[in-house]
Image (tube, rainbow, N blue to C red):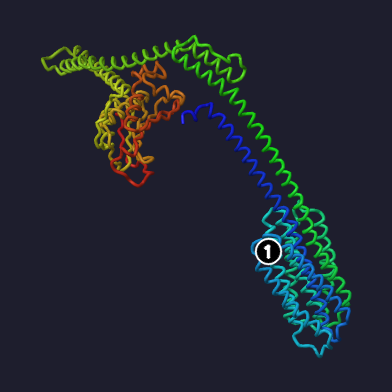
Amino acid sequence: MKRFMSIRSLLPAITILMTAALMGTCAVYAMQAARSARAAGIVPVIVDISDDLFSAIQAVRLERASVDTAIRAQEPAPSAVLGAMEMRHARFVRSLDLALGKLARLRVSGVEPKVSGIRASTKAYDDARRHAATEIQLPGQNRESGLSQEWLAANKRLVEAIDDLSVLLENELGQTDAFVANMIQIKQATWIVRSDSGDERLNLREAVARDRPLSGQQLRQFSLLRGRIEGNWRLVQEKAQPSSIPPQLRQAIQAVDQKYFSKYLPMRHAVLEDLNAGHPVRTSQQELEQFTTVGQQTIFSVGNTAFSLLRSHAAAQQSEALSNFYFALVLMAVFAGLGAATVIYVVRGVVGPITTIAAAMRSVADGNLEYAIAYENRTDEIGELARGLRVFRDNVITTHELQIAKDAAETANRAKSNFLANMSHELRTPLNAIIGFSDIIQRQMFGSVLERYRGYATDISESGSHLLGLINELLDMAKLEAGRLELHEEQLDIVEAVGDCMRLIAPLADSSGVRLITCLADRLPRILADPRRIRQILLNLLSNAMKFTPREGQVSVSAFCQDGGMAIVIRDSGIGMAPEDIPRALESFGQIDSTLTREREGTGLGLPLAKRLAELHGGRLSIESELGSGTAVTVWLPAERLVERFTDPAQKPDRQMTAQAA
């Protein structure tokens, strides 16, 4: 395993894997291109099949019209009509056989039931056709009743069966891309228009032959067909709106607008008006047939044009896919050559020199500073590595000296902390004695003294207390830095703690003319903390706020639940500080302005000590301040410190107590 993970083995292996990955990507791209080429090659075949099916339907519809006309005529059908029937049926059989033969060579799912339906419908159609051909050779009065309905029903079933197969194939094409889908939708809508216009033509011919006013049912049927024709034609026009539609398709659609909708429809409307009014039809049957034939041929040409565009589009896609396929093969060959060349270079030009330099590094690390370093004259990264090794060798002694200096500095820092801790202990004993004796003098416990001496004793007591407070802060900071400060945790009522601290700070506020405000939320939960350290935090922050708040100002304390924990905010209306000075104020012995510090006394330990004590409780301390706008210090204790939990996370302060300075 160790040998396998060496650079000598790993770099060539990575290079080979990367080359294989690139070649694999190209192979996948080539396979996708090949599949795209095959899919594009199938499109013309399906288009040809749909075209043949379209031609078969067209032949069936033409045969339907001629046979229906012969059935409605009273005289026997002439041989010309029978010959036209045979010719159109032969065209239908040829187109259908071509379509089904091509379809048999494709693998399209779901076509077997459709083909079976076509064959069954074709058999029924052939039976109906033979029967109709026999009957139309007889005079009208000798023919079977219902012959026309039987013939039209067989024709309709066959057309619907062929159309179902055509729609299935066209939907298969519609999944390739947007252009193909658009052309298929245009063709399908055009075919519906063609089919409905043929039905309307048949109904109109029948109405003209009867030559009597139209019934309500006939009017509704004409209206229904007209609505379907116009609705589907609007769909064709909408699909032809994008600029990507080829001009030849636009021209075919315009031809339908001109020859069918602009010329035939007014004529058809006039015929229906004549029939409905009981007037003789002013348009001859021959003229009507001529216009409907031309109109339907233009509609038919739209579908043919869409199929032609599909063929061209598929050919272009196939050509592009083949180009991508050959390009992927070329890339595979290029990557294979580059990979082989890279492996050779990695082994000879990278791995070998790195191995030599690694041996030199081990020798230097073992203390052999005279070891010869190779490849320093190379201008690439190997040369830089060799020159870096030389610099490393030259800096070994310097690094050793720096380590010695670092150890000395850490030792000095520990000595400083120990000195502060020891000296703080040593200084507190005589200071306590000084403060005690000064209190005895103040109280005149052993006899009366002069008032002047009592004043001196008061000064001694206050100065000693102040110095004792500074020593305690130094001792706490030293313990914090040394990691020896321990918390004595118990349940604490924050309301009581704030009240105690406010009472202690009240005399100072009274003498300074500063108003104290307490604003605490109702039903604050108890916290698990060190009561002495929490009070120390509050007193430090309150004292600090009092120092920098002028007369007639105010200092407020608020507490409420926030972010799952508890927030305590001490806000003053003092002189404030610039936002960029806040980090310096949180440093030990940090003083933003030494003049202000001398005026108001202090060592700069209040804020840092409060911050460290808050963090020792798992919380945090943050400051918001601006010059001239006061300062807000927030101490946040985490949810783990709350003994009782409440469900309202947005609890706001609503209990307020105010202490006004005298």
Task: Judge left or right: residue 592 versus residue 442.
Answer: right
Tell me the residue that label 1 is attached to.
168
List the single residue furthest toward the top.
370
Secondary element at image label 1: helix
List the single residue furthest toward the bottom.
141
| 391 over 574 or under it: above or below | above
Q: In the rendered image, which quarter is residue 289 located in?
A: bottom right
Point 30% across, 41% down: residue = 524
Q: Nearer the viewer, residue 46 or 222?
A: 46
Point 75% across, 77% down: residue = 126
Is residue 108 visible from the viewing direction of this image?
yes
Estimate the x, y position of residue 253 in percent, counting from the top left.
80, 60
Estimate the x, y position of residue 284 in percent, counting from the top left.
88, 77
List the single residue furthest toward the left.
446
| 211 over 549 or under it: above or below | below
Point 88% across, 81% down: residue = 79
Point 89% across, 76% down: residue = 286
Estimate the x, y position of residue 531 in percent, counting from the top left.
25, 32
Q: Nearer the viewer, residue 542 or 80?
A: 80
| 326 over 363 or under it: above or below | below
Is residue 513 visible from the viewing direction of this image?
no
Q: Amino acid at mark 1?
A: Leu
Task: Judge left or right: residue 95 versus residue 348.
Answer: right
Q: Nearer the viewer, residue 376 or 613?
A: 376
Q: In the rendered image, which quarter is residue 530 located in?
A: top left
Estimate the x, y position of residue 175 in percent, counting from the top left.
67, 56
**Which of the image's four quarters has the C terminus?**
top left
